[in-house]
Amino acid sequence: MSLEFHVRQTRGEARAGSLVTPHAKIETPVFMPVGTAASVKGVPQDTLEELGAQIILGNTYHLYLRPGVETIRKMGGLHGFMSWRRSILTDSGGFQVFSLNQLRKVNEAGVTFRSHLDGSTHFFSPESAMEAQVGLGADIIMAFDECTEYPADQARMRASMEMTARWAARCKKYFAEHKHQVPWRAVPSFEFQVSGDADPRNPQPEARNPELSQSLFGIVQGGMDRALRKESAERTIEIGFPGYAIGGLSVGEPRELTREIVESTLEHLPKDKPRYLMGVGTPEEIVEYANLGVDMMDCVLPTRAARHGLLFTSEGKISIKQARYAQDAGPLDPNCTCRVCRRYSRAYLRHLYASNEVLAQVLNTIHNLSFYLEAMRRVRAQFSNCADTTAVQGRIEAGA
Ligand SMILES: [Zn+2]
């Protein structure tokens, strides 16, 4: 098994369903917290579980540079390394190579880039990006694409889209030949070694089930041109993937344009396969995109904003550093039931932030993530309460 996707209910373009990966079942639409370097900054894995994070994202570029794919592979992949039993998705590294490297050199073979850590030179190709992601062992991995910059002229957008399509075919071929090398084994538990008793909830590492495999998703590019997006979708679908992502957005374009491109691209994606919108969204926007028919989303905004003291609440965005909160005894968000809002006052959170306490980042991030995850939970709940729906079923066979 690599992946199963069932659309349970639809309402207009929106849909609710489930995505079954080798590690867990995910209710969709789903928001995926970003754990760039095998860590959602400031939040331990057990807290992520408590918050209801169903799948988290890791960045191949960062993990490849540090600690290195080989280290993670030897630890049984990301699941074993970071002790995460639920699902994981890794990006291909393409976006970071393009966004973090001014000195990159791109040609048909791949991309030569400099490490942002020590300036050393590296090379990513469609094949090596697949090799890295098989070694990292996420449930869902992404094709290596070129994220077209914004703004870009027509010729540039076309050339970039066409190279992404050629790279997608190379990714699929390499992945098909190497996916059996995924390093999965059970997530280790250290708890039982202390007590001396085997914990039945935490099985010991065992031989990998050869039936389980990763899934490779294709990525639609095409810049801000609707016709190129359509062509990119058609070419990616022709190559054939068990899921499709919309990439190359949130690269500096106006928000209305993002929405327009998302909406027009979704029209060309198959209804029976998961659709993943990459790297996008305020809380309002992720709800809007879910209502347009997006099944999966990730964004660094809730975690990054939290570290800057910007908090999303049911009453709007709050900058907790402001002096007006210095003696505010109320909860951060009176309508939020997260562990931060249940326990701490705005005055205390403001003090932690102003004092540069580590706990400020931890608590702020927990609330923001909770707010995002709750927003998606509410979208899913609307389906259960809505009688006027149509049931559609789609099943994706392994290796599709
Ligand atoms: Zn809260």
Image: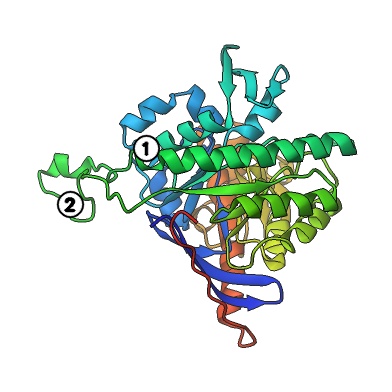
* Residue matched to label 1: 77
Residue with the most extreme left position: 196
**Horizontal arrangement in the rendering, residue 338 relative to residue 320 (left or right):** left
Q: Can you say whether 119 is above or below 62 in the image?
A: above
Vertical side of 183 occupied by 338: above or below:
below
Decide if residue 357 is in sight here. Answer: no
- Image coordinates for residue 221, horizontal then vertical, percent: 73, 45
Image point 89% across, 36% down: which residue?
Answer: 153
Q: Amino acid at mark 2?
A: Asp
Local SS, label 1: helix
Answer with left or right where residue 201 lies relative to residue 96: left
- Quadrant hosting residue 116: top right
**Residue 28 appears in the picture as rendered:** yes
- Around disc 1, counting alpha carbons within 10 Å, would you say few (fewer than 14), some (14 to 19), or many (20 or more)? many
Between 363 and 163, which is closer to the camera in this rendering? 163
- Position of residue 150 relative to residue 263, above or below, is above
Left-right relation of 28 to 81: right
Q: Amino acid at mark 1?
A: Gly
Disc with the residue nearer the chain's start (2 vs 1): 1
Q: Is mark 2 within 8 Å of ligand 1?
A: no
Residue 276 appears left or right of 257? left
Q: Which of label 2 and label 1 is nearer to you?
A: 1
| Residue at image location 46% in from the left, 36% down from the top | 38
- Badge number at residue 199: 2
Secondary structure under the numbered disc 2 in the rendered image:
loop
**Residue 385, position as x, y percentages in the image:** 58, 82
Nearer to us in this view, 386 or 194? 386
- Count of all numbered marks drawn on residues in the image: 2
| Residue that appears at 15% across and 40% down | 193
Q: Quick one: label 2, few (<14), some, or many (20+) residues within 10 Å?
A: some
